[in-house]
Image (tube, rainbow, N blue to C red):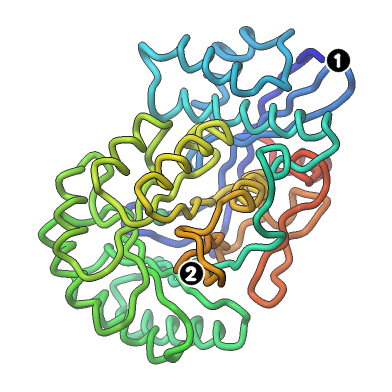
Amino acid sequence: MKIKSIKSYRLRAPLGDQLFYSSQAMFPERNSYLVRVETDSGLVGWGEGGQWGPAEPVATVMDAVLAPRVIGRDPTEPVRIWEELYGYTRDYGQKGTYVEAIAALDIACWDIAGQAAGMPVGKLLGGRFRDSVAAYATGCYYPQDYHDMPAMLRALEAETTGYKGSGFGLLKIKIGLLTLAQDIERIRVIRDAVGPEIGLLVDANHAYTAASAVRMGRMMEPFDIRFFEEPVPPEDRDGYRKVRSENPIAVAGGECEFTRYGFRDLIAGGCVDIVQPDLAACGGFTAFREILTLANCHNIGTVPHVWGSGIAVAAALQAIATIPAFPFTAQAIPLLNEPVVEFDRKHNPLRDELLNERFELVDGRLAVPQGPGLGVTVNEEVLARYAV
Ligand SMILES: [Mg+2]
């Protein structure tokens, strides 16, 4: 089997008045870069590259650098293709856009390899430990007018009361845009609204110095926070180590990290308790498998990050299905020893409309697609609607 054509899709879905903030930026739209790989046998594979931001850089790398090198290659050899593309772009790649483009191609090749073998990618990678994955809700973003504290707290209370009885056992909330005291006030309102049953996770999107993060971790301790995501910038390895050793909450990170090399430094460097590779950023399934092995060697959890279109979610579910318990026990408990999947609660038509299949939450869990490859198919009409 040979790759016959590679086509890039830049998708953009404006959010209108549903825009929101993290600690880093306003999100006025959803963006995704998708690649469609077609073979001479008629099989078509899909991949996604990058977790947010404009799709143009990844599209340019794919179209100008990678695609000409893989036309005519056998897509059922994704590991070989990965090594050759990474080696070819190493001098100027290593992280960021180049690896995101390799990730997109890798996901599409595994999709094709799974279809050729007649099995889902999770099975092709060695087997599925689970057919569904406990989902955590991501919500409590900052509104446009985040200076109006009373209005924000009222909206938070209304939003989070809705999570009670929703099936979600875990809720991830944003912190880091306001003062420590203001964010603690938000957490207090959220904890009161959801009650003691729902586990809370916090995500600072690398908003703090290590000293501030340690202080924030101690201030958050009474609210039973299960993990503290990206407390400091991804390059600050010493800061990560300080936060991990001096704050009482488990430290998570890795959505801005790339390949086995980047994760080697994060994991073996003792920076995190939970590692969060994003399939569409870290280098696809091929890199994910290597990162998982590194994490297993250090007895830390692997909980992939996912924030993209339906293709990224399907890839994440296939990958998460293959993660063994960390460590092995006779009972799987979400997050304690069992991976969970991120299910963002903000409007995302690129996730919820793009596929012919739907991701449906049943008893707080998302089913891992059963069909061959990624197990999902793209609705080409919807694709055309959001393609730039
Ligand atoms: Mg995050």
Q: Position of residue 46 (x, y in %)?
A: 72, 34
Q: Quadrant of residue 129?
A: bottom right
Indicate left or right for 202 with 314 as reference. left
Relative to 47, is 24 above or below? below
Q: Which mark is residue 258?
A: none
> Could you classify mark 1 by the number of other residues whose Cα lies within 10 Å: few (under 14), some (14-19), or many (20 or more)?
few
Residue bearing the label numbered 2:
139
Can residue 247 be seen?
yes
**Quadrant of the rendered image containing residue 148:** bottom left
**Disc 1 residue lies near ligand 1 with CB under 8 A:** no
Q: Is residue 74 above or below residue 291?
A: above
* Image coords of residue 224 (percent x, y): 33, 80
Figure quadrant of the N terminus? top right
- As drawn, the residue found furthest toward the front would be 330
- Looking at the rendered image, the disc whose residue lies closer to the viewer, 2 or 1, is 1
Question: Foreground residue, 265 or 189?
Answer: 265
Camera-nearest residue between 148 and 93: 93
Answer above or below: position of 44 versus 162: above
Please report whichever mark, 2 or 1, sits nearer to the chain's N-terminal start: 1
Q: Residue at x 62, y 57 (%)?
A: 348
